[in-house]
Amino acid sequence: MGPCVVYLRNPRPTGGWPGKVRNYGFEISRAMGIQARFVHFLDDDDTVPAGHYENVKRAFGDNPQVGVVFGVLEPFCVFSQDLERRRRQETRLAQIRQEFSHAARVARIYHHIGSTMRMGALRRWLYRSHALIGGNLFLCSGAVIRHEHVIELGAFDPHIRITEDYEFFTRAIVAKGVHFLGRISANYRVGGADSLWNPMELSTQAEVQLRAEVARLLQSRYLRLQSEFGAVRLKLTAVAFHLATWIIDSLLIPLLDRCALVLIRREKQRRRTPGSNRALTAIASGSR
């Protein structure tokens, strides 16, 4: 049996290219002969909840047709003692929490379309189309992928500095399919000074440059997808997916919110009703 933990120092620091670092770690593990069925590219400032990997292995076993398992990202922040910085951290944490919450709700809807409504083909289309057209349902720390699929996909594109996980998992979901775990898969740190995606210490000019780089990468990604799938097919997929997204965001989610409120009110009313617990106790006692 090989070592449980191997710590490596990158002989060629990349200066902020996480895809290259992940590829380096993956290739070194293969060269060392480390055997694995699944790979989790967990960022060094994120953590996983207890029992997570057992849940992931069970999900892969129950869904042998999929190559990726992901769950809910739970953001957290190590707050600064500086009051102004803490205020900005709190704002950023609230923003990320809202984004992750919406992504989780959408993923749950996709999941139940397949598992509850037994419409597996529609669920696969929704996940695939979301990967191609929509935003992130998860970030790199939130997903685990089969080891052999990392090899088949060629790992991360070393020419992409940021959005590299978005590009990699788009290819993975389109080619291998995905399953939603329905629980927290990683605790995701936000508000750090060393954050690559959302640094809080950038000047206005640097932030503009970062946004411009992201826009260029996303445009390049879209052109590659056009070349691979065809402009007409990709456009039709986008139209159909945006219609599905409108139905989910404008109709399904508000409907679910209203249903949840009704259930909460009924539960509160039941608890406030005098004698309700005594009545339940009497019924339970009389049934013995």
Image: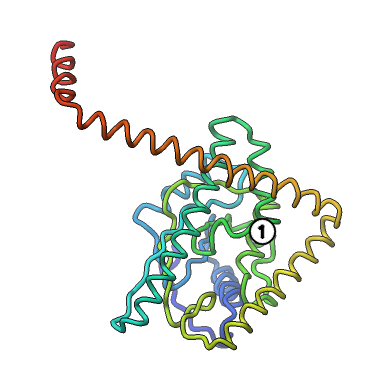
Residue 167 pos. (x, y %): 66, 65
Tell me what residue is drawn at x 46 percent, y 46 percent.
182
Q: Residues within 10 Å of mark 1 (few under 14, many from 20)?
A: many
- In the picture, the quarter occupied by the C terminus is top left
Q: What amino acid type should be assigned to the residue bearing mark 1? A: Thr
Tell me what residue is drawn at x 58 percent, y 76 percent.
24
Nearer to me, 182 or 276: 276
Nearer to me, 84 or 81: 84
Count numbered badges in the picture.
1
Say which residue label 1 marks. 170
Residue 82 pos. (x, y %): 31, 84
Could you tell whether 82 is left or right of 190 in the image? left
Tell me what residue is drawn at x 56 percent, y 72 percent.
22
Nearer to me, 254 or 50: 254
- Does 87 appear above or below 259? below
Instruction: Kindly indicate the quadrant of the structure image that contains residue 240.
Output: top right
Residue 63 pos. (x, y %): 56, 41
Could you tell whether 70 is left or right of 211 in the image? left
Could you tell whether 39 is left or right of 216 in the image? left
- In the picture, the quarter occupied by the N terminus is bottom left
Nearer to me, 28 or 166: 166
Tell me what residue is drawn at x 72 percent, y 75 percent.
216
Residue 48 pos. (x, y %): 40, 60
